[in-house]
Amino acid sequence: MYQTPFTTFIEGSNSNSWTFQFSLHPSADSKFKRFLDIVGSLIGLLILAIVFVPIAIAIKIDSPGPIFFTQERYGLQGRIFRLRKFRSMVSDAEKLKSLVSNEANGLIFKNKHDFRVTRVGRFLRSTSLDELPQFWNVLVGEMSLVGTRPPTDDEVKHYNQRHWQRLNVKPGLTGEWQVNGRSQVKDFEQIVDLDLQYQKKWYPMYDVLLILKTFFIIFGRVGAF
């Protein structure tokens, strides 16, 4: 990937490439947002340190395989980074994906009764504990506490210019999608609408508002599966 002042050329891991116009969103340069990210990620990593051992043991007992699920994702202006989550599926989940029907519309994959999700994985997903390792991505600046869901390579290779506008902000642990339906939102274009809505609405304290809403969603286990 390389950048000019007006254009970004993106090369995917499958050797496909795309060239689109980007306009960096003001949130990407916000010192308050970065301060919030650093403080929030340090708190998140402290929580991770506390719960890591019991979660790791539960994952290992429930299903053979690694503790973490690691995947390349696309971040701000198409920059590729490695995202880690606690593994919530069987270790060969990608090979079994073709056996699961997609209940969503567009460039996302959702199935409420996905057989690949483990028993511990369902609990981790419903409580968002599987997301805790991503606080490291936030701390190093690859992600933000609030932003858009970071897409995968097999999604972005089908993006048009409207879709790429999602990545004018850093990807986030939470965002408009998470507080407005979460997994119950199954239409990709609706998710894009929410992401672009965030960019229009954004001001520094708006992130704080979305974080507070996220706590309500998580503790109420609203919309997750």
Image: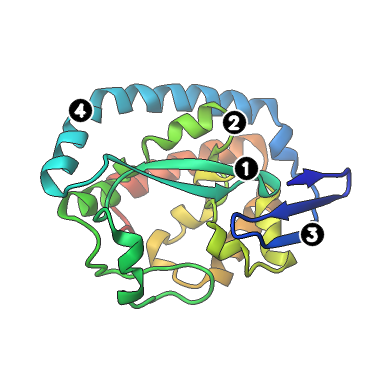
Position of residue 104 relative to residue 5, above or below, is below
Q: Residues within 10 Å of mark 1 (few under 14, many from 20)?
A: many
Residue 53 marker: 4
Q: Amino acid at mark 3?
A: Thr
Who comes first in sequence, dot 2 or dot 4? 4
Above or below: residue 26 compared with residue 197: above
Secondary structure at badge 1 equals loop
The reply to whether residue 220 is visible in this rendering is no
Seen at 20% across and 28% down, the residue is 53
Q: Earlier in the sequence, mark 3 or mark 1?
A: 3
Amino acid tagged 4 = Val
The relative height of residue 181 versus residue 127 in the rendered view (above or below) is below
Discs 4, 3 touching: Cβ within 8 Å = no
The residue that disc 2 covers is 141
- Please tell me the numbered disc located at residue 170: 1
Label 2, secondary structure: give it: loop
The three-letter code of the residue at mark 1 reads: Lys
Q: CA distance from mark 2 to mark 4?
A: 26 Å
Where residue 165 appears, as percent x and y from the top left, is: 71, 57
For marks 4 and 1 on the same chain, the one whose residue lies earlier in the sequence: 4
**Residue indicated by mark 3:** 19
- Lateral position of residue 214 relative to residue 205, left or right: left
Of the numbered discs 2 and 1, the one sitting upstream in the chain is 2
Residue 147, given in percent of the width and then of the height, sits at 57, 46
Q: Disc 4 or disc 1, which is closer to the eye?
A: 4
Instruction: State which mark lies toward you, 4 or 3.
Output: 3
